[in-house]
């Protein structure tokens, strides 16, 4: 569901319906949402999830200039990076309420709530950094601080929380 206006009402999405930067995607208690982004990224929202599409700028002629920021407010999301994220890792950010996830090229899952974030990787790698000490929600790309941790698919059955 997407917000339709200031009153908080929304609209149900159908196959092929567009979404835009600034939209908030929400799923109900028994619903899933699969979104194919313009750069061929895949975002899957599981039940009771809320995700803000803060920034999604992709130019197929110049993927390296992409700027992408997704914010998982709560719930469970699987994301497979597309051409924009792959070509512009410094321009890509996936935020949770308490941490930033930066790409190394990947297929990853994030579960988040107000006070926790859990990240696992199926393919590629990510860098996870709690906010503070040089890492802010407003940035793009992976944060680089003493608290940054890299997680890769080679670390089978591992996750960061």
Image: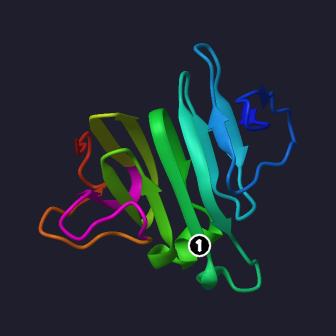
In the rendered image, residue 40, in percent from the top left (x then y), is placed at: 70, 59
Q: Nearer the viewer, residue 113 or 62?
A: 113
Residue at image location 43% in from the left, 49% down from the top: 108
Q: Quick one: SS at disc 1? A: strand
Q: Which colouring convention does the figure follow?
A: rainbow
- From what the image shows, is residue 158 above or below residue 101? above
Q: Is residue 144 magenta?
A: no
Residue at image location 35% in from the left, 60% down from the top: 126
Q: Quadrant of the N terminus?
A: top right
Residue annotated with mark 1: 67
Q: Residues within 10 Å of mark 1 (few under 14, many from 20)?
A: many
Q: Is residue 134 magenta?
A: yes
Task: Identify the magenta region.
Answer: 122-139
In the rendered image, residue 147, in percent from the top left (x then y), is placed at: 15, 62
Q: Nearer the viewer, residue 67 or 137?
A: 137
Residue at image location 75% in from the left, 54% down from the top: 20
Find the residue positioned furthest to the left.
146
Q: Nearer the viewer, residue 7 or 73?
A: 7
Residue 153 located left or right of residue 4 = left
């Amino acid at each position: 569901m997407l917000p339709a206006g200031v009153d908080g009402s929304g609209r149900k999405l159908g196959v092929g319906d567009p979404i835009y930067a600034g939209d908030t995607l929400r799923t109900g208690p028994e619903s899933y949402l699969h979104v194919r982004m313009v750069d061929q990224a895949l975002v899957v929202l599981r039940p009771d999830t809320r995700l803000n599409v803060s920034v999604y700028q992709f130019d197929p002629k110049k993927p390296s200039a992409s700027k992408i920021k997704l914010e998982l407010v709560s719930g469970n999301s699987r994301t497979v990076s597309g051409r924009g994220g792959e070509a512009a890792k410094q321009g890509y950010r996936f935020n949770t309420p308490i941490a930033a996830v930066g790409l190394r090229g990947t297929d990853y899952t994030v579960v988040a709530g107000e006070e926790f974030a859990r990240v696992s990787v199926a393919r590629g790698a990510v860098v996870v950094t709690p906010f503070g000490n040089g890492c802010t929600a407003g940035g793009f790309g992976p944060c680089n601080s003493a608290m940054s941790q890299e997680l890769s698919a080679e670390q089978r059955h591992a996750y960061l929380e």
